[in-house]
Image (cartoon, grey):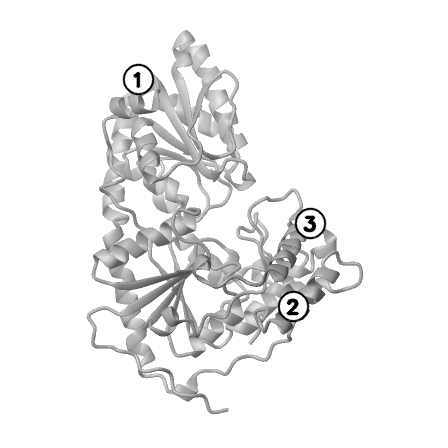
Amino acid sequence: MTRPAPPTINRTREHPRLACLATHAGQAGGAAIAMQRLVVALRESGGHVAVLSGDDVQPAPAPRRRLERRVRRAIKRARTPLSNTLFTADWPARRLAAHPLVTAADVVNLHWVAGLLNAAGIREIVTSGRPVIWTLHDMRPFTGGCHYAGGCPGFTSGCHACPQLAARLAALPARVAARGRRSLAGIPLTFVSPSRWLAGEVARSTIFDSGCHTVRVIPNGLDLARFAPGPRAAARRRLGLPDGAFAILLGSVSLAERRKAMTVAAAAISRAAGELRHRLGKAAASLQVITYGTGQLVIPGVACRHLGSIGEADVALALQAADLHLTMAREDNLPNTVMEALACGCPVIATAVGGHPEMVTDGREGWLVGIDDAAGAAAAVVRLVERPALRAAAAERARHRAEAEWDATVQARRYLDLAAELLAGSGSRAANAMPPPVALTPLTPAAAVAVHAGSPLRGPLRRLRRLSRFHRLPLGTT
């Protein structure tokens, strides 16, 4: 089949014109915050950047939205105790290749697009002639639905028998993964991973096509003027905290997410408090915990101040008031919380998983412990309370590490260089060299699994398919 020539792209500007696509923008979670910081840095570096989020796309008709909610609830009810981190199947997604912000761009930069774009929609953008950079914020782009695998290696072999879903929907991820693999095969696609760990995971996945997919590692950045050490006493006065307490900060979008292991962090702090009471007597009562995010953490015998869901300015203030940031996450990429802490000169105790070891060198900017190792974390806390000079030295090294590696302007320059490189390469690709769209069945993977006899999604998804035809709203097909 002869394909039309791709649109003429203006290569005379100093920087390529980028379109950043994401389901959520602004401060709606860690991925949205990371993208917003990149957008600001790109614009300050002279880049031409447009942002297209789910809020900018015309909503689907009300009947379809109601049915989509039923599908999501069915999957939520099928979750197993292994994880409560987000799980999203191949929802009926948008087709944005013809959106004005996309057609006006030289390069498209995808971010966290679950529920906005599926693999088929991404293929349409690539085959329209625009280079695509897909920034990974979690594992969802290369799994059958989980945003973090919970230790399951299924994404390397097709996501069969998913341990995160009950038996009635356990086959769904394999269908989703197979569809993604078919849609993304044979097209040029550049993944950008903030961490070397996540770059290695996507390269191991079944959706990765080594013949035409590439992975680059570009760490996230942040505004080092906003996230910087400040007067601790003044910060504590503003938060109403005792000046002499040893303050430990725990923060997350949700304190109840099992992946973040806040109960293990609480156990570590409780254990440290008991050890300090044994060693120091009443002086242990000065241990103070600061938390932020949805939910609440209670640690018996330890003073806790919960700040709720807060913005960047208040996060920086809390870090300036804290002596230590503690994260016992069982899986993570290159978390904003750790980066922000180090930039504010706040040492970190973290689990040696995911991207944590790329941010914290054990014994320098902080300390690394094993997964669920409450005893090891408690021992590190006690050591820092008893040795203030050790904490001060780690704080100074933490700030130096942030300045060397996570300046947002450096991240922006790397993205602009990559975009220019991809744009130059796309100019030499013949129009008919682009692979045609793959032939896909009209049902989404969710429908393909769920319409089988006895599925709780059988009726809703059939009606959802009929609605999509009536309103001419494709369910993520090409």
Quarter of the image where one finds residue 80: top right
For marks 2 and 3, the one nearer the N-term is 3
Badge 1, how many Cα within 10 Å: few under 14, some, many 20+?
Answer: some
Mark carried by residue 467:
2
Which residue is disc 3 drawn over?
78
Q: Secondary structure at mark 3?
A: loop
Horizontal relation, residue 168 to residue 266: left or right: right
Q: Secondary structure at mark 1?
A: loop
Check the image and report above or below for 129 versus 162. below
Give the amino acid at mark 2: Leu
* Residue 242 image offset from top left, x and y in percent: 34, 17
Looking at the image, which residue is at 31% across and 23% down?
A: 236
Give the amino acid at mark 3: Ala
Q: Which is in the foreground here, disc 1 or disc 2?
A: 2
Residue found farthest to the bottom: 2
Q: CA distance from mark 1 to mark 3?
A: 47 Å
Q: Are marks 1 and 2 in contact (CB under 8 Å)?
A: no
Which residue is disc 1 drawn over?
243
Q: CA distance from mark 2 to mark 3?
A: 25 Å
Q: Are marks 1 and 3 in contact (CB under 8 Å)?
A: no
Check the image and report above or below for 395 versus 73. above
Asked whether the viewer can see residue 211, the reply is no
Give the amino acid at mark 1: Asp
Q: Which is in the foreground here, disc 2 or disc 3?
A: 2
Looking at the image, which residue is at 44% across and 73% down?
A: 97
Quadrant of the rendering where the C terminus is positioned: bottom right
For marks 1 and 3, the one nearer the N-term is 3
Q: Nearer the viewer, residue 289 or 367?
A: 289
Badge 2, how many Cα within 10 Å: few under 14, some, many 20+?
Answer: some
